Structures are given as C-alpha cells and as structure tokens.
Amino acid sequence: MPLIYSYPLKSGMPLLLSTIAMALMTSTALAQSNAEKSGHNDEAASFQTSAFGRMPDGRQVDLYHFTNANGIELKVINYGGIIVSLKTPNVEGEFDDIVLGFDSLETYLSEEYRQANPYFGAIIGRYGNRIANGEFSLNGDTYTLATNDGDNHLHGGDKGFDKVLWEAEPFENEDGSGLVLRYTSEDGEEGYPGKLETQVTYTLTDDDELEVEYQATTNKATPVNLTQHSYFNLKGEGSDTILDHQLMINADAFTPVNESLIPTGELRSVEGTPFDFTQPTPIGERIEQDNEQLSFGGGYDHNFVLARDNAASDELVLAAKVWEPQSGRMVEVSTTEPGIQFYSGNFLDGSLTGKQGQSYEHRSGFALETQHYPDSPNQEAFPSTILEPGETYRSRTVYRFAAQKAFGS
Ligand code: GLA
C-alpha cells in the first residue's frame, strides 16, 4: 500500500494535513482508496442505525449516523428527513455541531416546537416557502391549500414533508455513505393535486461534502419545490448569533416581497442595497438598516436570484459561501436551483432549548434554502414549478465544508 494511504484520516486529525493528503491523491488513487474503504477499513466512511423514538401511532423513528473519512459526522432521522446533528472541524481540527436541533423525538413532536415551527434541519415540501392566500390555478382548476402562515401557505402546509415519516435506506458507495428517503404524498394532501412519489438522497462524501438530491414524479400536474431547512451556526450551535459570519451570495438580484413576505414579482438589483452579498460581508453589518425589505422580513428572509450565467438546469452553480472568522469554518453551497432563500433566523426568540441545553436566541442560526422562487404558481414570469405526469423533478444541492484562516482560501 503506498505510504500516502497510511495517513490516519480520522476524527481529530488536523484538517490541513488531511487536506494535503487528499490533494496528493490522484483520482485513480482516490478511487482505489475508496475501494479499500468499502472493504471495511477502520478509516472508511461508515454508518450506524439506532432507534430515535416512536411516533404517536407507534411507528419507530430511526437515527442514521454517518461518519466520513475525515471524521465529519452527520445524523439524520427519518421523521421529516431531519438533519439533527452535523459535526465539522474548526481550523484547529476541533469538532463542533454546526446545526440547530434536538436529540429527542419528543421535542420535535412537542406542541411548543410546532407552535414555533422553525423547521430545523427538515426536508421541506411539497412547496418550499409561500404560496399567496393558499391558492393557485392550474389547467383551469383552482386549488385551495392549507393556510398556515397568516393568509398564506408556507412550506407545504399544516403537515408538510418536514412532519411525516419517510422510508429510509442507508447505503455506502465509492463517494461516501448516506441515506435514501422515500415518501408518497397522496393526491389531495394539504390541498395539492396528484400523487407525488418523492425521493431525497443525502450523501456525506469523503470530500467533506453533503450532497442532497431530490427526485419526484406525479400522476397529475402539481407544483413541486423541495428544499432543506438546516440552520447553521459555524461557531457551534447554541453558542452565539450568526451576525459576524461572512456571507457571499452569487446573486445580482433578489425578489422583493410585500408585508406578508409574498414576492411582488419584481426582480430587483441588489446593487447599493443591504442585499448586496456579491462580496463577502458580515451578516450583521447592514441587518439593522432602515430598509423596507429588511423590516418586512424582520431581517433577511428573501429569495435571491442566482447568477447562473446560462448554466443548464442540471448543472451545479455556486450559490453561496459562508465563513466564520473565530472557528474558520466555512460552508459553500452549490445548486441546480435558480434561487436561494437566505433567512437570518429572525423568528428565533430564545424560547426553544437545543441539544446542549442552550436556548436558541434571535438570529443564532441561518438557513440557505435552495429553491425555485416563492409563490411561483401565481407568478407567470418566474421559472415554472409545475411538474407534469411523465416528467421527473430533479434538483441537487451540495454543501461543502472546510476550515480556513480567511474567507477566500
Ligand atoms: C423560511 C421562511 C421564513 C420562516 C422560516 C422558518 O425561511 O421564509 O419566513 O418561515 O422559513 O421559520
């Protein structure tokens, strides 16, 4: 075995060393090394399954625990496809949990949590974000959806994909390990037309990426807009606000909203506004500015129009990058989607207590939800979200994690 493979790529190893080791591997060598890993070498990407709790009707909810070759750990449950924990190293190689969440099913099912409804870590569907007045017309029929956000429909309704039990199948392959989740949303569920067969695949790769692939088919035309609602705090969840995190969003425009957060239909240039994140900027730098859009959102809660430069719709394009100066942790988001909702955790108010006993304070986590634009079923000029029978909805987002001494390195 070549010397390079004897580097112990595991938890606690300084990231720099592991990065150098990874960089030294040629792609052939990497494939060879991965083949060895699937042979159950100790340093291989791996998974474990355990019981997480029971639904009120007695069905068991499982926890899937994945570890990659560099010690990154991901925990997912099949209730809501929720990412309950994600541990990545800082520049010193120390691991921390960087997503908000809980370690018991009871908390996710509690009335208190349902009232607050932050959608921590969950898969969102059938439609991510809002549909105005819970209504849309399609092929001459008008459909009425659950209104669970004032007069509007939000994140799939009263019982969206974040609150259902998914069938789950863990796997290991040459890229890493992960989980295939499947859910059938019946015709008429939450008011939507068509039986939707949905599949979401999480893969934690040995390249320190979390890949999320979405697929769906339907038997009647229906809107579909799936996303992932993890709240990140790169300093470690429960520790502080996210206001000093530096953010870059690859967007020259955003979709301004009215006071109930429904897009007006305009694509507005970010230039000269607090929405210009084309250069890395601390999230908190302009968040308190006197700005109508910021006041509507109580901070950032807006869809950005990604600069895709005519990339094909199945091509990944860099959407956003966030770096936290104290820990050096970085997350980079690439997607096939045309938009991304940047939400600065404005509705968090300290009333929820997280995994380590800390309360989740105002703006102590941010979400970057890759998506089609909100309210597209009512906005002809926006890219269509209608899936027809015979077509397959496909969407892909990759989160890459690293630790580095500066934003750009
Ligand atoms: C999205 C919405 C927000 C809010 C959060 C969860 O980002 O746009 O308004 O619902 O989800 O609280």
Image (cartoon, grey):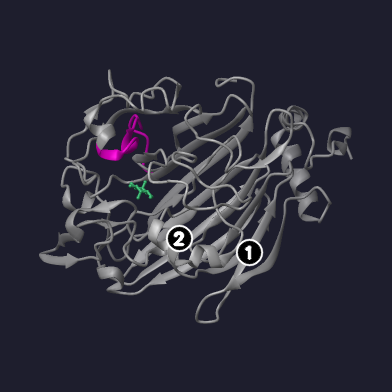
Residue 216 location, quadrant: bottom left
Q: Is residue 21 visible?
A: yes
Residue 378 vs 333, above or below: the answer is: below
Please state the extent of the stretch shown in magenta in the rendering: 296-314
The amino acid pointed to by label 1 is: Leu
Residue 43, how many percent across, how many down? 81, 47
Determine crowd level at label 1: few under 14, some 14-19, many 20+ residues with C-alpha closer than 10 A: many
Residue 82, how many percent across, how many down? 52, 58
Identify the residue at image location x=79%, y=35%: 13
Identify residue for label 2.
Answer: 113
Residue 332 vs 37, above or below: the answer is: above
**Which numbered disc covers residue 106?**
none
Q: Is mark 1 within 8 Å of ligand 1?
A: no
Residue placed most toward the observer, 56 or 3 = 56
Q: Is residue 193 visible?
A: no
Identify residue for label 1.
Answer: 63
Nearest to viewer (mark 1 / mark 2): 2
User: Does residue 135 show up magenta in the picture?
Assistant: no
Identify the residue at image location x=51%, y=63%: 108
Residue placed most toward the observer, 331 or 152 = 152
Residue 211, how many percent across, how many down? 54, 47
Identify the residue at image location x=63%, y=32%: 402
Look at the image and tell me in which quarter the N terminus lies.
Answer: top right
Identify the residue at image location x=22%, y=31%: 292
Residue 229 vs 70, above or below: the answer is: below
Which of disc 2 and disc 1 is earlier in sequence?
A: 1
- Left or right of residue 407, residue 16 in this image: right
- Left or right of residue 341, residue 237 in this image: right
SS at mark 2 in the image = helix
Q: CA distance from mark 1 to mark 2?
A: 19 Å
Residue placed most toward the observer, 351 or 114 = 351
Look at the image and tell me in which quarter the C terminus lies.
Answer: top right
